[in-house]
């Protein structure tokens, strides 16, 4: 039976890694013992400034916790899908590539040591393509073949806002499903976090920095209050259609403990939306 981890664990890299390892071993009898610690090490090296040529992550919203939220959600989704008996069954290698993709999907916010101005938020508009480039450089150095690198890049592209899924050229049905799962986990993992509402000011500041450096507004938000006002609409008008239609409803595999049980991610997001609407009602 699938066990969901407490939300507080998503702030602790070690606890998240332990949960991912448990899911991985539960699904694959031939699981590679060092896979999870190895790829988590890549993330920690990158975000803590131990990656040659890069500074530590300095964005306040797209931080380490954000990456861990998406990774935990993805692992639970893929475990739930496997336990449901859904076909096609995802191979161990596809599971591994999906975990790598979600761990690396926001490395595009990292700045190089030669780039001291501002924070990585200035790359908001191009962070997905930068993440794909970072993933390519890293995985090549780790000895990955080009087809595996391209699979990871396709999965990362599924996290781009407004991406037209039809333009992505997946090499297989497994890769496509994994990509949809990564895109779903990125959205649900962050929006279900206990501190999602409290972190919206940090997200607005990232948008503002991007506008300042790139000259393009992100979402046309006028203020933090405006962002909070529009977030429930974003959930209803963008995220729900995205995960239901574009990503073909893979979020359903997060239900616990049965196929018709509660989806804790959706429940927590709805709680966050109620909180935002309540704040707006009081202030309005």
Image (cartoon, rainbow, N blue to C red):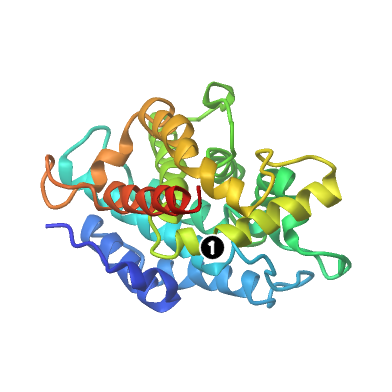
Q: Residue at x 40, y 60 (%)?
A: 193
**Relative image position of residue 12 (x, y in whole percent):** 42, 76
Q: Is residue 59 left or right of residue 269?
A: right
Q: Is residue 22 left or right of residue 111?
A: left
Q: Is residue 96 visible?
A: no
**Relative image position of residue 21 (x, y in whole percent):** 32, 68
Compared with residue 121, is residue 50 higher up or lower down, i.e. above or below? below
Which residue is the site of mark 1? Answer: 199
**Relative image position of residue 236 (x, y in whole percent):** 41, 34
Q: Is residue 92 left or right of residue 97?
A: left
Q: Quadrant of the N terminus?
A: bottom left
Compared with residue 88, is residue 213 higher up or lower down, i.e. above or below? below
Q: Residue at x 40, y 46 (%)?
A: 94
**Relative image position of residue 176 (x, y in whole percent):** 44, 33
Q: Is residue 212 left or right of residue 75?
A: right
User: What is the quadrant of residue 154 in the picture?
Assistant: top right
Which residue is at the far top?
Answer: 166
Q: Secondary structure at mark 1?
A: helix
Q: Residue at x 74, y 52 (%)?
A: 208
């Amino acid at each position: 039976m699938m066990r969901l981890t407490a939300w507080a664990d998503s702030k602790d890299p070690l606890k998240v890694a332990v949960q991912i390892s448990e899911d991985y071993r539960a699904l694959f009898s031939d699981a590679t013992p060092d896979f999870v610690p190895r790829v988590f090490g890549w993330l920690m090296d990158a975000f803590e400034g131990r990656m040659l040529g890069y500074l530590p992550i300095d964005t306040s919203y797209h931080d380490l916790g954000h990456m861990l939220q998406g990774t935990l959600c993805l692992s639970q989704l893929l475990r739930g899908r496997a336990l449901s008996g859904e076909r096609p069954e995802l191979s161990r290698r596809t599971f591994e590539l999906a975990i790598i993709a979600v761990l690396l999907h926001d490395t595009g916010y990292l700045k190089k040591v030669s780039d001291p101005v501002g924070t990585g938020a200035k790359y908001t508009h191009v962070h997905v393509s930068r993440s794909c480039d970072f993933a390519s450089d890293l995985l090549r150095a780790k000895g990955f073949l080009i087809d595996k690198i391209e699979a990871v890049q396709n999965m990362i592209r599924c996290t781009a806002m407004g991406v037209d899924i039809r333009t992505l050229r997946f090499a297989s049905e497994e890769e496509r499903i994994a990509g949809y799962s990564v895109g779903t986990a990125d959205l649900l993992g962050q929006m279900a976090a206990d501190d999602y509402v409290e972190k919206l000011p940090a997200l607005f500041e990232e948008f503002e920095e991007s506008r300042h450096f790139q000259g393009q507004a992100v979402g046309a938000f006028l203020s933090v209050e405006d962002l909070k006002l529009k977030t429930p609409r974003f959930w209803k008008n963008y995220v729900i259609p995205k995960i239901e239609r574009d990503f073909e409803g893979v979020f359903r595999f997060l239900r616990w403990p049965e196929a018709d049980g509660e989806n804790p991610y959706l429940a927590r997001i709805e709680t966050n939306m109620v909180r935002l609407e309540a704040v707006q009602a009081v202030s309005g």
